[in-house]
Amino acid sequence: MAKIKKRMPWFSGQGLWKETPAEDWGSWSWQLRNRITNISQLESLMTLTEAEKAGCEFANEKLALAITPYFFNLIDREDKDCPIRKQLIPRDNEMTVAPWETLDPLAEDSHLVVPGLVHRYPDRALFLVTNHCAAYCRYCTRSRLVSNSQGYDFHPQIEQAFEYLEKTPHIRDVLISGGDPLLLSDKKLDYLLGRLHAIEHIEFVRIGSRIPVFLPQRITSELCDIFLKHEPLWMSIHVNHPAECSEELREATGRLSRAGIPLGNQSVLLRGVNDDVETMKELVHRLLQMRVRPYYLYQLDAITGSSHFKVDLKKGIEIIQGLRGHTTGYAIPQYVIDAPQGGGKIPVNPDYVEGINEGEIVLRNFEGKIFRYATGTLETEKSAEKPGFPAELYA
């Protein structure tokens, strides 16, 4: 009998902050006030590597350092290669710039129609409402903007954005992002969602947020009541590794699901974090248990200082091949490259089509077996000369 792999536990608890009153620990404002934001705080909690020390010295030149106490607890402080540690703690190699990297790899600034509103796709708009996050991912594609470390001086013009959306009737879908929009107060979110849903041609609104992952305490019953007022509302969260899937996150996604919000996940393929089949399989299985559908697996954007996270494209294809046919179809994300210079998301798939011939397509399945599928229809068969097949068979 095959040995059953021991599953990673669902972490829960206050860890290093076990003396903190539960009421404080469960408060999202307390979590924000007590974030780890400098090297002195980090060194009081863990032993940093020399690469991390050097990275922290220069961190604020690229992107601020910030980690919530809750999420810091998920770091394995004894493992210098901990996948959560790699995502949040600066290292010296993020100050190295590869020739292909840019500050705005997706050319979002060139599609700004008003400050904070990006209109690239014909029927969709990206609404950037804040430059703040609860914690800062070191590979962030908007590191030029979030935390204002690079002097981007981001000031979204919310009312101008509403005016543009109101006079652009072919926009049917608005994605609210940032920064992280769930850092806005309940009152501001209520206003924002209400204004968007009052625009007749906007069919639905999406929120892109890592707050449920970094700060599950933010997903309160009051916030969920606001979401219920403004349906249909969809949300994409951002989980990269199964160790991020805690009991607290599962409770937060449960509250969101019960508030009627369909949830998807967008992961970034990161070297040393999730670039193997078993890790990705564990991740997508946990996401489904939390009622979150794996949506996208992104190839890393060419953001300045991120090359140490880059994974060979062939490895990404191998991971999708290792999932297809070996796990639930719902669990398989779409592997995409968000094309440079604003080209949009382009799917990257394993090649399962061996050939397209006259009347058939030749396919290879997940086991490598070859199958032939007839492409004809009854009408094409009727019109073809088929010796030995009487016409009445087609009647």
Image: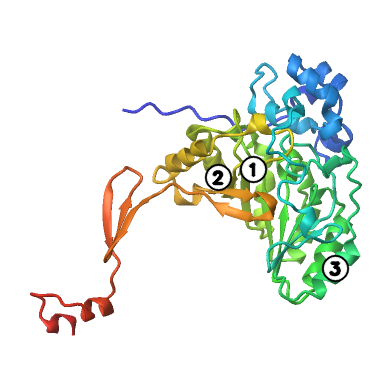
Q: In the rendering, which numbered label is found on residue 61?
A: none
Measuring from the top left, give residue 360's x and y in whole percent.
28, 62
Please say if the residues under marks 2 and 1 sit with CB atoms less than 8 Å apart. Answer: yes
Measuring from the top left, give residue 322's x and y in whole percent.
43, 39
Category of crowding for the residue at label 1, using alpha-carbon neighbours closer than 10 angstroms: few (below 14), some (14–19), many (at least 20):
many
Question: Residue at horizontal 18%, vertical 81%?
Answer: 394
Category of crowding for the residue at label 3, using alpha-carbon neighbours closer than 10 angstroms: few (below 14), some (14–19), many (at least 20):
some
User: Which color mode does the image show?
Assistant: rainbow
Q: Nearer the viewer, mark 3 or mark 1?
A: 3
Lower position in the chain sequence, tag 2 or tag 1: 1
The reply to whether residue 17 is in sight is yes
Location of residue 124 (image quadrant): bottom right
Category of crowding for the residue at label 2, using alpha-carbon neighbours closer than 10 angstroms: few (below 14), some (14–19), many (at least 20):
few
Above or below, 79 against 378 in this view is above
Residue on which the image places disc 3: 162
Measuring from the top left, give residue 48's x and y in whole percent.
76, 16
Q: Quadrant of the N terminus?
A: top left
Give the total number of marks visible in the rendering: 3
Along the viewing direction, whichever of 304 and 286 lies nearer the viewer: 304
Q: Quadrant of the C terminus?
A: bottom left
Lower position in the chain sequence, tag 3 or tag 1: 3
Along the viewing direction, whichever of 119 and 18 lies nearer the viewer: 119
Q: Is residue 330 left or right of residue 303?
A: left
The reply to whether residue 281 is in sight is no
Q: Amino acid at mark 2?
A: Gln
Residue on which the image places disc 1: 250
Residue on which the image places disc 2: 289
Measuring from the top left, give residue 348's x and y in whole percent.
51, 49
